[in-house]
Each structure stands twice: as structure tokens, then as C-alpha cells.
Image (cartoon, coloured by chain):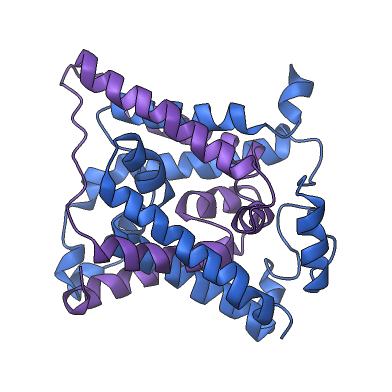
Amino acid sequence: MKAIKYLFTGILFGIVLTKSEVISWYRIYEMFNFQSFHMFGIIGSAVVLGVLITQGIKGFGLKSIKGNPIVIPPKEKAFWRYLIGGTCFGLGWAMTGACPGPMFILVGSGATIFLLVIVSAMFGTFLYGVLRKYLPH
Amino acid sequence: MVEWISQPWPWYVAGPLISLVMFLLLYFGKRFGVSSNLKTMCTMVGAGKISGFFRFNWKDDVWNLLFVLGGLIGGYIAKEYLSLSETVEISEATIAQLQSLGIENPGASFLPESIFTWEALATPKYALMLVFGGILVGFGTRYAGGCTSGHAISGLSNLQLPSLIAVVGFFIGGLIMTHLILPYLLVL
């Protein structure tokens, strides 16, 4: 059962985000008020180490578990989709205190109301799929 | 050891562990991006009948669904077995500010209880926060092509300018909501 490694990686992710309070609405509210270093420390240290990991993978030509070279595709060049889409995301992030990962983790931690938030987010994704041809990218 | 794990984890433990999660997924030949699951789930419930955007073989992304299912289980394990207390150590300034907005006992648990329960749906402003907030996250993340994991962590780690623009957007939206909308919405 090769797929089980994804489940275990997810369990690690869920434990880390719960234990570090990233899934707490309060932590997100506090972050957007710049009243604590906590969230910035988490995202900042994850990115700094992430840069080293990503550059290391490229520099050493690290191969994946299946023996293929690890390829990290670049993001598509654009401007408005990132700025406008990102702003919509931020509005929702500050409102619900949860980005997509924490929504699922919160359900597991007992806050079942986030099932409703997940269904709403699915509907938002659906709206994007329907409206995308009319939106600036 | 168990006692240490039961405390809230500091940023310098959590941040590197998140990079480890990203590394593991890259090493498995995948990528770290949670929001794609929302699209996959739309496809699974038949959104492809209405929009071509959702016509793809969702079975290719089952690994990512397993990842978020793991996240859900991890949330359960952390809450049930690895935590001694429910409190969140937010700053005094944040507590005072939230009290002035009518939030009771800020930081006493992970979520403001007045907002994040099924009963809260009876209060229009809270129902709006849950439903419209969710819609904004789902719409925005697909429009921007990624969320905190895909852009802020994976994209910035790969030095992608598009991800930096997206993260600037995340903060524009978050700051507008926190400073210009929530202070009025919460006291309605």
C-alpha cells in the first residue's frame, strides 16, 4: 500500500498545524494585526528552509522515491490573477481564520462547523471554474 | 518528552516541520498544495457536467485527498492525545482588542465559540463569516492558482515572483478584512 505514505505525511502536517496553533482563528487575527511574531516566524522559517531544500534538490539533482529527477514546475507568468485572486483569498482567510489545510485539520480537531466552510470553499472554487473566462488573468 | 510535546509548539519547531512536509511530498514525486483538493472534490461531485474546468481525471489526485485526510486525522490526534490545554497564548493587545469587539474569553480555546459552532448559523453575521468567508477562500485560491501551501510555502521556496504577488494579495485581503470590515461586522 504505497499510498499510505501520503496519509502519514498528512497526519504529520495536521499535528504540526494544530500543536503550533496555526489552525486557530485567533492566531490569524493576531497575525493580521502584527501583534505577535508567531505566525511570521512559522511561515518565515518554513520559507527560508524551503528555499534551501528547493535549491538543494536542484543543485544536487536529487531523485524522487521512484528514481525520477524531481521537477518543480514554475508558476505561470501573470499578474492580475495572483493579485486579485490572492486578495479574495486573504479576505476569506481573515474572515474564517482558516486557509484550506486548516479547514480539514479543524474538522478533525472537533470543530465540525468547518465542514460547512469546506463546502462553501468548494462552491467558491466552482464559481471560479464557471466564471474564469470572464475574469482578468 | 510527552510533556514537551503536550505544550504548544514554538514557531522554530513548526516552521521547519512544515518545510519537511513540503520536502517529503517533493521526494514522493508530488507537490505541496492543499487547495487543489477543493477542485478535485468539485469534480468528484459532478462539477464537470457544468464546466470544462472540472473535467480531469480526479483519480490522479487521490494522493492529495489522502494527504488532507491525514491532516484531519492529525488534527484529531493532536487535540485528543497531544494537548494538555485548550488555550491559545495570543498577545495581550489582541485579547484587549477582541474584547472591545465583543468576543468573550479570547484565546480560551482555539476558536471564538460564538462564531464557530452550528448554533452560530442562527446569527446572520456569523453565518455570513462562515459561508461567504469559505466562498472567498475557495474562489480566491483557485483564481490565484494556490493557497498558503502552494504559494506562500512552495512557491516562495522556489523563488517564484507569481507566488510573491499572490502572497502580497493574501495580505492586502487579510488586512482589509481585519482592519476595515471585521471591526464593524463583529459589533453589528
Q: Is residue B28 left or right of residue A94?
A: left
The tint of chain B in the picture is blue
Residue A4 seen anywhere in this rendered image of the structure: no
Q: Is residue B3 left or right of residue B16?
A: right
Residue B111 seen anywhere in this rendered image of the structure: yes
The tint of chain A in the picture is purple
Classify B128 as above or below B159.
below
- Displayed quadrant of residue B89: top right
Which residue corresponds to the image point at 78% horizontal and 65% vertical from the top-left?
A: B97
Classify A41 as above or below A97.
above
- Quadrant of the rendering where the N terminus of chain A is positioned: top left
- Displayed quadrant of residue B6: top right
Which residue corresponds to the image point at 32% horizontal and 39% vertical from the top-left?
A: B63
Residue A112: % across, % down: 62, 60
- Quadrant of the rendering where the C terminus of chain A is positioned: bottom left
Which residue corresponds to the image point at 55% horizontal and 71% vertical from the top-left?
A: B177
